[in-house]
Amino acid sequence: VGGLGSCFCFARDRQSEHREEKILTTIARDLAGRDQSFRRALADVLSKDHTLKTTPDVMQQWQQLILEPLSKVNGAIVGNVVVVIDALDESGPDTSREHILSLLSSPEAAQLPSNFRILLTSRPLADIKRVFSTAAHVKVTSLDNISAQLAERDVQLYVSAELRLHPQIGAAEVQSISKKSDGLFEWARLACRFIKPNRPGRTIMERYDEVMSPNSRGGGSLLDAIYRTILEDTVPQDDTTLARFRSVMQQIMSTSVPLQLDTLDEMRSHLPPEEDSFEMWIILEFMAPLLSGISDRGSVVRPLHASFYDFLSDEKRSGVYFVGGSRTHGLLAFASLHTLCNDLKFNICGLESSYFKNAEVVDLQERVNKNISQNLSYSCQNWAYHLQRTEFDTTLAALVKDIIGCEKFLFWLEALSLLNGLGYVTGALSSVITWVESKGQDGFEKTLALAQDGIKFGYNFSSIISLSTPHLYISALPFTPSNTMLSRMLMPKFGGLVGISVGSLREWPAVQQTLEGHTGWIMSVGFSSGGKRIVSGSDDKTVRIWDAETGVQIGGPLEGHT
C-alpha cells in the first residue's frame, strides 16, 4: 500500500495505562488494516495461538506479531511503509521502554524489509541515546542540527495552511509569524489558534498585533509568553476565578489517566462539602487552544502539548496561573472513596447465573458500560493511587474503613472483576497498610487487619473471581478461613451460602497461590524487579509468565527451549 503504516503516540498523562505493552499490537493491527498480505499472515499466526491477542509480553509481540508476518510477506507489500513511534521519552521511567529500545536496536530490526522503516521521535534522554548510539542500523538525527531556514520554511507552510481562510492574514504576516516562532511548532500552533476568531471583542488583526508585540519574546520563552497571553485572555484575574482555575487544572493534572469532562464534573460532585461547587465548563469553555476534550465532550481532557503542564507547574514561569498540588491528591482520594461508598452495590451488573464465566456472558460489556459509570470505574482502580500520595488524615482513614470494613469490600472486588482490574487489589491494600502505619496504628488496628486479610483473599481467590464474578460470593467467601476477621465480618451478612462441614481452614494457608500450567518439573523461577511478574522455566520445554497478584498466566507458553 505504501505510505503511513501506523502511528503510535506516547503521552505523559497516560503513563499509568502501560501503553508500552500495547504499541506492537497496535502497529500489527494497523498494518493488517492497510495491507491484505500482512493481514493474511497475521491471521495465520493468531490462529495458532489465540493468547497473542492479549499478551503484554512486548518481546513475544515483536517476534510473532511483527517479525513473523513480515517475514512471510517479504516483497509482497507494495511501496514504502513508514511506522511512526512518537514521543518515546514520555512512556514513563526507563524501565517502561527498555524492551522497546532492546528490540529496535537488535540485529533482527536491521533485517526488516528494505521498504519498511520505523521513524521514532524523542527527547535525547540518556537511556535512549545510549542504546541507539551503538546500533549501526539506526540513523540518529538531532533537531539541533536542522538548519534554521529549513525549520522556518516548515513552520511557514503550517501557518499558511492554518490561516488560509482569513484573508486579513497575508503572505507578509505569515512570514512574520514564522520568523518569530524560532522554528518552534508548538508556538506556531498556539499563535494560530489565538489569532483565529474564537471570542468577541477583538479583530483578527488586533490579535495578530498582540502575538507580534515586542513584549513577546522569541524561542522557548515565547512559548511561555503565548501561554500567558492566552490565559490572560481566557481567565480573568479576580480571586474567585483564579482559585477555580487552579482547582480545575489541579484536578486535570493529578488524575492518573485523562478523563472526559463529564467524568471530571461527576468526580467534583463527590469532593468535601466545604469545597467550592461549580461546573468545570465555566473555566474550560475557552481553553480549547490549550486542552483537548473541550469542544468534543466525548474526548478526554488533556493538554495539547506537554509543555503546558510544565509551564503551570513552574511558579516563576506561570506567575498567578501557577498550579500547585499539595492538597489535590487528598481531595481526589476523598472523592474516589466517597464514590465507592455511594455507588457500589451487590450484583451491580445484574448477572443472573453463576453457571457462566464472565467471557460467556454475551452482553457483559454493555452491562458494565450501563451500570458502572466512568467515575466509579476510575474510583475503583485509583483511590489508592491518590491515597498514597497524601498525608495521613483521619477523615480519609474513616472512609477507607467504611469500604474495607463492611460488605462494600466485596462489592469493590465485584466491580474490579467486571472491569478486569483485580490486579489492583493487593497493591491498593498494601498502600493502605503503609499509609496507616506511617502515623501509627492507634484506632485503626481493625483497618490494618482487614487490609492484610484482603491481600491474602486476593492472592487466594483472584483467579476464581476473574473467571466468574458471582463466585466471589458463592466460592471465595465460604472458603475464606473461618478465624479471619474478614470471614467473621462478612459471612453473617450473606445468608444461603454453602457451609464447609469438614476440612475448612481456620487461618490463611502458607501457600498463597498455585500456578497451574506446566506439565513437567520446574527448573527455574524468577521475579520481575517490581515483584508483579513471575517467570518459570520447566523441563516441559516451555517458559511461562504469570501475574503475581492474580496467579493468571500472561499470554501463552514460550516454546522452543531445549
Image: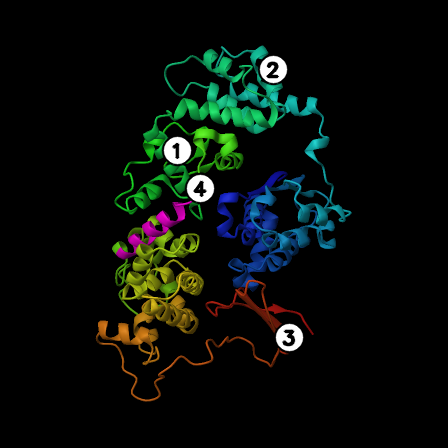
Three-letter amino acid code of the residue under disc 2: Gln
- Distance, label 2 to label 3, CA atoms, is 66 Å
Q: Closer to the N terminus: mark 4 or mark 2?
A: 2
Does residue 499 sit above or below 355 in this rendering? Answer: below
Q: Closer to the N terminus: mark 4 or mark 1?
A: 4
Q: Can you identify the residue that label 1 sits on?
A: 294
- Distance, label 1 to label 2, CA atoms, is 30 Å
Whether residue 117 is visible to the viewer of this picture, yes or no, is yes
Label 4, secondary structure: give it: helix
Say the numbered circle drawn on residue 541. Answer: 3
Q: Can you identify the residue that label 4 sits on?
A: 253
Whether residue 300 is visible to the viewer of this picture, yes or no, is no
Three-letter amino acid code of the residue under disc 1: Ile
Where on the picture, by quarter, is residue 3? top right
Measured as percent of width and height from the top left, residue 38 is found at 61, 50
Q: Can you identify the residue that label 2 sits on?
A: 175
Label 1, secondary structure: give it: loop
Nearer the camera: disc 2 or disc 3: 2
CB under 8 Å between callouts 1 and 2?
Answer: no
Q: Closer to the N terminus: mark 3 or mark 4?
A: 4
